[in-house]
Image (tube, coloured by chain):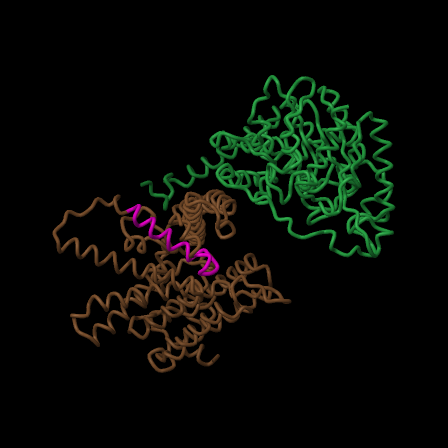
Amino acid sequence: MGRLLIEAASNVTQAERTRKSSLAIQIRPGLIVLGAAVVAYLVSAGSFLQVGLIGLDLILIGVTFALIRTGRANSWLGLLWIGLIIAVLVGVKIVPIFGVGTVNAGGPALGWIGFSYLAFRLLHMVFDARLGKPNDATLGETVTYALHPASLIAGPIDRLPRSLTEQRHRSALAPRIRDGLWRVGTGVFKKLVIANSVYALITAIDMPRNPGYSAGLAWAWIIAYAFYLYFDFAGYSDMAIGAGSLIGLRLPENFANPYGQPNLTRFWTSWHISLSAWLRDYVFFPVSRILMQRTDRRHQTAIQFTAQITTMLVCGLWHGISLNFAVWGLWHGVGLFATAQIIQLWRRMGWTPLPGWAGVPIMFVYVCIGWVFFCTPDMPTALMILGRLAGL
Amino acid sequence: MINMRTSPIRSLPSLIRIVVKAVILVAILNFVFLVVGFDPIQALVRINLWGLAGRGRERVIYASDFQNGQLPIPALLATHELAVRPKAADEYRVIVLGDSAVMGWGLQDVETFAAQLTARGLYRDGKRLVAYNLAYPTPSIARDTLLIEAAQRYQPDAAIWFVTATGFAELPHDDLTRGVLQINRSQLSRITDANGLADWYDRWVMPEAPVTRWSAFRDPVLTGVWIGTLPYPFIVPDVGKAERRAALAPIPIKARFTSDHPVFVGMPGDTWRFLEIGKQVADSHGMQLFIVNEPILIQIGANSETNYNTLYERALYDRYRVELAVRTQVLGIPLIDLWDAIPAANFTDTVLHMDADGYRQVVDRVIEVLSE
């Protein structure tokens, strides 16, 4: 392993050799980022045992780097590595001892914080290598990308080329600080003020424990949840992006007014943007491509349906391996397919396009219904709440 | 749509200047509020939506909204029908204090002591008697004294104050009481300072961080609690379940509270002073005060010669009753001692909680005294 790493780290172009002359210089920025990541882990986990999991992160990053640099990502080793990362990702979600936020009975809480995000970063690197996309990142730059302390715990899921641009071309200090402070401030406001206030409403109504409440209260609860989730997650993303800006490693945007979008397709280009873009590039397009190659054009609709369903099923299961998350994913897969079909039908019929704002409430209601599956612990509870929403 | 991704203030020095100015402005406001004694959060949490629902609450807390109880007492009372309903000219207003038993755990609103007393249609001093349920879970005469004082703005004519031994504990033994005293520490400290109970206050209330003493925005966490209470006017509250029968539980060798329990060592302690303070408040506002020693379940069976039930050792409880009789006599407070007045069959899930018929009997006994 050590030999592989050294071989990989040494396998750099002459231009890079003139820029960074030794292994130590290559990994120094990565060490700084690693230190910050350790601090981030400690702050969020509060346990040195979980900090030890950073060591596992490093091993995974190192092996990924080595496979790519030695060209072995294209071989069966690369496929095996992809399978292993996915297996670990599934294991993290299923096995309690490594379950994020799950307490192992009688022992300390061992959660592999941020692994879902790390796994997607590593998979992206391997997939791009297998597609022949160039990768001249050094080991330090790879560690910096994979363990960006601001996005370690909950994203955004950055891409290596974008991260390298940030690492290699630092923007001016004053605007970075100015915008970084602004984003951290707005993130704190969204998360600590708005999200926490809305959460008080959610716990007050608490639909899962109060099945007898009226339809009005059920809708108030799910709408409150929709906004709580947005402000909590978007607030966190703002803080991460702001922190990234402050340390000179900006992160990609993750939200763009999702609840103000006119249809579900646009919703998914503005909600958790980094995840939906990843799924689009590494699940939807490959699945579509493979199906297109193996069938003919007559089956385009079926191909689109299969690709949408598969992509959103993966999205759901990435959040958690459970029936509820799977159904949530399928709900959105069906919705995305239906949206595309309706838009195509509208165009074919030559009807006047509806104003953008007309679709917003329809999209919002559809998303809120989906959130019922997302936020309830099991299907009976979800179905009960759906019943209340329908006035049953 | 405003672009929130980049700072609208294009220059970093300008942004820093604005932040500094904002901090200075908040500091000035804080100083002004401290000087005039205005707590903006305490003012905010008194706002409620019960007016929209056209009514007030019949209890300060229900089983489904204990969160409501984490608000300051003035905010609690502001949602109660006591505050929402103006006092009628022909109304003899009675406030009822006590613990979860008097609050009506497991009972519908119409079955509680206060509701049943009102339903009797009695008249006192030529006015129609209307009782208001201000009982709050877990016994505490210190907390009840705060309620008595805060309720005076709503012009009660009398108070019926249910007490039991655990309400006189000298040291904290439950988080709920400690929590409500903590939230209402300003009112409590004023009372304890005026009555030489500073040591008692220090035992019951956690010290504040020094920075909090310099902040007019105390207890910002109340804001989240308050937001959570806003939907309550539109929610049918849960009244709790009282399906167990406490009488069926075996009496342990050692009851939960005994003479050597730390909270009762040296009884009577300083907590008993709150009886006197409550009387002073009542007298100063012309309010009549009646104390009811709450009925308890008297169990039979093994260990019953030592303990009345799972909660009270006999020796402790008897000592308490004697002290209560002496104190109320000295203070001139009519005492209605109902400790053994209610049959065991009327008790529900605890040695204090009763069913509707149990409270009917309590109402009968209280009316006898009120009629004298």
- Of residues B41 and B246, the one drawn nearer to the viewer in this rendering: B246
Q: Position of residue A300 (x, y in %)?
A: 19, 68
Would residue B281 be found to the left or right of residue A376 on screen? Answer: right
Which residue: 66% across, 23% down? B156
- Of residues B30 and A86, the one drawn nearer to the viewer in this rendering: A86
Q: Is residue A62 above or below residue A323?
A: below
Q: Is residue B82 above or below residue A5?
A: above
Residue A161's image quarter?
A: bottom left
Q: Is residue A280 above or below residue B202?
A: below
Would residue B323 be found to the left or right of residue B131 on screen? Answer: right
Q: Colour of chain A?
A: brown
Q: Position of residue B16 (x, y in %)?
A: 46, 39
Which residue: 56% across, 69% down? A97
Majority SS type along the magenta span: helix
- Of residues A312 and A370, the one drawn nearer to the viewer in this rendering: A370
The answer to whether residue B235 of the structure is visible from this angle is: yes
Residue B63's image quarter?
A: top right
The answer to if A365 sits in the magenta stretch is: yes
Would residue A137 be found to the left or right of residue B21 on screen? Answer: left
Residue A311's image quarter?
A: bottom left
Q: Quadrant of the N terminus of chain B?
A: top left
Magenta residues (range): A360-382
Would residue B80 be found to the left or right of residue A384 on screen? Answer: right
The answer to if B105 sits in the magenta stretch is: no
Q: Position of residue A88 (x, y in %)?
A: 46, 73
Q: Position of residue B56 (x, y in %)?
A: 55, 31
- Of residues A384 and B366, the one drawn nearer to the viewer in this rendering: B366
Figure chain in green:
B
Which residue: 47% across, 31% down? B52
Q: Quadrant of the C terminus of chain B?
A: top right
The answer to whether residue B178 of the structure is visible from this angle is: no
